[in-house]
Amino acid sequence: MLVSFEKANILGGETPILHGVDLCVDRGEIVYITGPVGSGKTSIIRTLTGENKLGAGRGEVCGFRLEKLKARDIPYLRRKLGVIFQDFQLLMDRTVEDNLTFVLRSTGWKDKEKMARKVENVLLAVGMHTKAHKLPHQLSGGEQQRVAIARAILNEPELILADEPTGNLDSETAGEILTLLQDINQIRGTAIIIVTHDNRLIERLPGRVFVCKDEQCRELACGDGSSEMGQKN
């Protein structure tokens, strides 16, 4: 089991925003977290990365117990995770290649030849190998998100956390990004948690669905209507 919450309280700042969360994610699964604005979806992601403390209960991600997580452990936890953001969060003054090399250096890589091969391989995987020397502002939104996905898979994570990964993209580009995530899941066996308000993603790439609402986060049973899946985020 990669992710496990048992009767967990999820904090938004210092205040519990979700109470008694029971949620688990196994290897290779696709799981969606959906719900209205301010319902705690992104707070779950921040808890999994160690940015937010666990309020109460038990939590575990990639072998790290969240209720016992110390500051010195957080970098090691994050090496096991790949995170994709809605707004890409690329370094705008560095090329695509330098953005990825920076991440490798930050996570302990030292051999320049191995880093260059790794960068080349992940850019090939996301169809961006011809854009290695471009700056982010020279890329379209979809291309920037492909680079962000390349960054997320650099260290071959067991789990990808995708927070509204298609939120800033048009429908056609969003479909391309979703197909890329599907390929990563199927080819690499990487588990993916996707935070989204867009039910079309769930229809195109089925997975288990958790709904955050009224300070609770509950799994949506198979066959339940899409009305529970969300109000516009």
Image: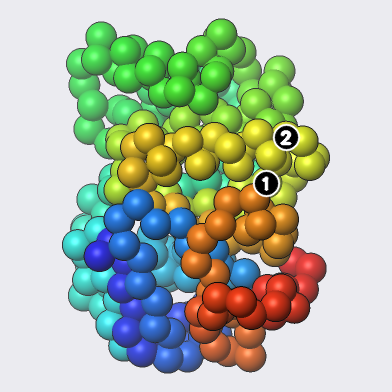
Q: Which residue is mark 2?
A: 173
- Toward the viewer: 79 or 98? 79
Report how many numbered discs are placed on residues in the image: 2
Mark 2, secondary structure of its residue? helix
Q: Residue at x 31, y 62 (%)?
A: 26
- Looking at the image, residue 179 sits to the left or right of residue 160; the answer is right
Mark 1–mark 2 contact, CB under 8 Å? yes
Image coordinates of residue 76 in percent, x first then y, are 23, 50
- In the rendered image, which quarter is residue 116 located in? top left
Residue density around tag 2, few if under 14, some if 14–19, many if 20 or more, within 10 Å? some
Q: What residue did someone put label 1 on?
A: 166
Report x, y in % for residue 147: 54, 28
Image quarter in which the C terminus is found? bottom right
Identify the amino acid type marked 2. Answer: Thr
Q: Residues within 10 Å of mark 1 (few under 14, many from 20)?
A: many
- Residue for point 43% across, 85% down: 21
Of 131 and 23, the residue lying toward us: 23
How are the residues colored?
Answer: rainbow
For the point 79% across and 68% down, which residue is it? 232
Q: Residue at x 25, y 65 (%)?
A: 1
Q: Position of residue 204 (x, y in %)?
A: 64, 50
Q: Does any portion of residue 135 appear in the rendered image?
A: yes
Q: Quadrant of residue 177?
A: top right
Cα separation between marks 1 and 2? 8 Å
**Mark 2 or mark 1, which is nearer the start of the sequence?**
1
Helix, strand or loop at disc 1? loop
